[in-house]
Structures are given as structure tokens and as C-alpha cells.
Amino acid sequence: MSSIGDQLNLARRKFKQFGLLRFAIRAPRAAIRHATSLIWRQRYRFYRTATLTYEGTEVTAVVNSPWDLERIKGRLETFPLDSFHEADIGTSDVYYEIGANIGLNSLIMAASLDCSSITVVAFEPDLANILTLSKNVSLNGLENVLIVPIGLSDASGVTKFFLDSESPRSGQGGHSMEYIPSVHRAATHIPVMTLDHAIAQFKLESPTLVSLDVEGHEENVLIGMKETLKKRTIRMLIVEIDETYDPNQSTIPSLLAEFDYELVNYATLDHMARPHCLAKFEPKATDPRGATP
């Protein structure tokens, strides 16, 4: 008859054998998952550039990171482009992309607008994105694009810029002047200006088409462009609104209503980690006497 000690040792051996068996079963699955993730992360290395086509317009973009490739191959948010093209882009239009990232919208719009003068202005404060954006503009031979390497806000100066990685790569889109604990991992400082100040300082043409996507800092940017909004040269404004799928639940529609801009359409972004929507604003129609109906 075995002692209690022998029984415990036998139980330990069987438990160890079971653990090894379980590991032998699970290890290949884990290895496959890891290899699949690694391949996805590293597949961008097979590309130097990639082609993006929108409504017959083809542009080429540099691939420097997995996020670049993801944007080019499937994460292009077409709502701004669809809205602008439905409004019949003309040779007199000037497009501002505020929060340009690697500039895919800017590239497509630049190919559609007048090439004899600066008709696209791309604002982007992140260095990795600026470098890729610059290469993209050069690669496509676009001479009508101006890159402004600053952030926009409600005051000019220097501010903290929160990064979603300690080693940011181009194409990453979570950087913001608004701190989000679940997203941001590091911070730096960047120069910022109001849009009104930037237009005056750099003697820019007033925009007629604007897309604004700055990860939760949109209201500050709008406050910093009040003089531009008063001129009503902008005939369409696309604003990404954070933390909601319904723009009416934010304060942005009421802010823009002060300048006679109204919400005319919006799209939800279900693929985002946090609730987001893209809202389209246009100037309210006026009657012949100049009064808003």
C-alpha cells in the first residue's frame, strides 16, 4: 500500500504530464497566431510603394510602415472625398487637409485641382508623417501642394503632443493634443497656430473645401478659424467628431451654427476603437435680400 507521499508524487507527475500535453497542443496554435501576426506586421517590407485609385484618379504612396500599407490598401475614409466630388470640384477650389497624416486625401485632391498654383494645403505636425507626406507629394510630381508642418489650435504657441507609441511610425493616427490614457504612450512638444494666423502669416488663399481630423481637438481648431468662417468662403467642411456616432450629441454643430453653417449629412466610423463620426457642414442658404431663411 502506497504512502500518502507516494500518492502525492504520482499526482504531481501526472499533472506535469498533462501540463506538457496541454502545452504540446496549444503551442502550435500559439505559434501559428504569432507567425500570422508577424507576417501581417512585416508584409509592408515587400512594398516600397503602393498604388491607390479613387474614382479614376490614381496616386502612388510610399510604404514606410504597416500603418502606411493599411491606409493605402483598405483604411481610406472616402466620405470627405465622396462629399467633395459630389459638390463638383472646380478649378477655383482650394482644399485644406487639417490633420493630413501621410496625405492620401491631399494627393487625390491635388490631382483633381488646378496645378498652376497652390490649391492643396496639408497641415500635419508629426515628423514621421511629414517625411512620408513629403515623399508622396514628390513621388507624384504634385507642385500644387503646400505642406505646413505645424499643429492647429485655438491659440498660437507651443503645446504638448501626445503619441500613441514611444517610437512613432508614419501612418499611425492616434496622436493628439488631447490626452487619452488608454491610447497615448509618450509625448513631445510641437508648434501650433490658429488657422486664421497661419493664413495671414503664410499669405495663403482662403480655403473652399476643408477636412478636419485631429483626434478630439477639432473644436479648438474651429475656434481658431473664426475669422475664416466669417468670410464664408468655405463651401464644404468635413469634421471628424470624437466619442459619438451622432454629431448632434456634440457642441460642434452649435458652434458652426454661429457662423451660419449647418449639418447636412454624416457617416459613422464603426471600425474605430472609439466612437467617431464624420460630419458634413455647408453654409446656410440665403435669400436674395441676404437674410438666412
Image (cartoon, rainbow, N blue to C red):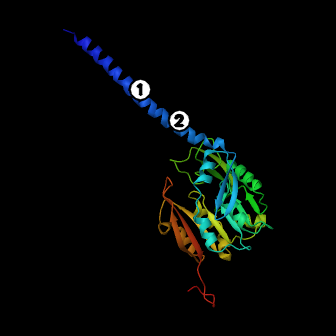
* Circle 1 Cα neighbour tier, 10 Å, few/some/many (<14 / 14–19 / ≥20): few
Looking at numbered disc 2 in the image, what kind of residue is underneath it?
Answer: Ala
Looking at numbered disc 1 in the image, what kind of residue is underneath it?
Answer: Ala
How far, Cα to Cα, is label 2 from label 1? Answer: 17 Å
Examine the rendered structure and indicate whether residue 41 appears above or below residue 119: above
Q: Quadrant of the N terminus?
A: top left
Residue behind mark 2: 35
Secondary structure state at the residue bearing disc 2: helix
Q: Position of residue 114 (x, y in %)?
A: 76, 69
For marks 2 and 1, the one nearer the N-term is 1
Examine the rendered structure and indicate whether residue 17 appears above or below residue 163: above
Q: Is residue 193 visible?
A: no
Q: Position of residue 209 (x, y in %)?
A: 66, 70
Left or right? Give the position of 166 relative to 242: right
Residue furthest front in the image: 56
Which residue is at a point 26% across and 11% down the rendered structure image? 6
Secondary structure state at the residue bearing disc 1: helix
Which residue is at a point 71% across and 69% down the rendered structure image? 94
Which residue is at a point 51% across and 65% down the rendered structure image? 267
Residue furthest right in the image: 116
Give yes or no for contact between labels 2 and 1 (Cβ–Cβ under 8 Å): no
Which circle marks residue 138 in the picture?
Answer: none
Residue furthest bottom in the image: 289
Residue behind mark 1: 24
Q: Position of residue 23 (x, y in %)?
A: 40, 27
Which residue is at a point 63% across and 43% down the rendered structure image? 44
Q: Is residue 96 visible?
A: yes
Q: Position of residue 220 (x, y in %)?
A: 60, 63
Q: Nearer the viewer, residue 95 or 194?
A: 95
Examine the rendered structure and indicate whether residue 139 appears above or below residue 241: above
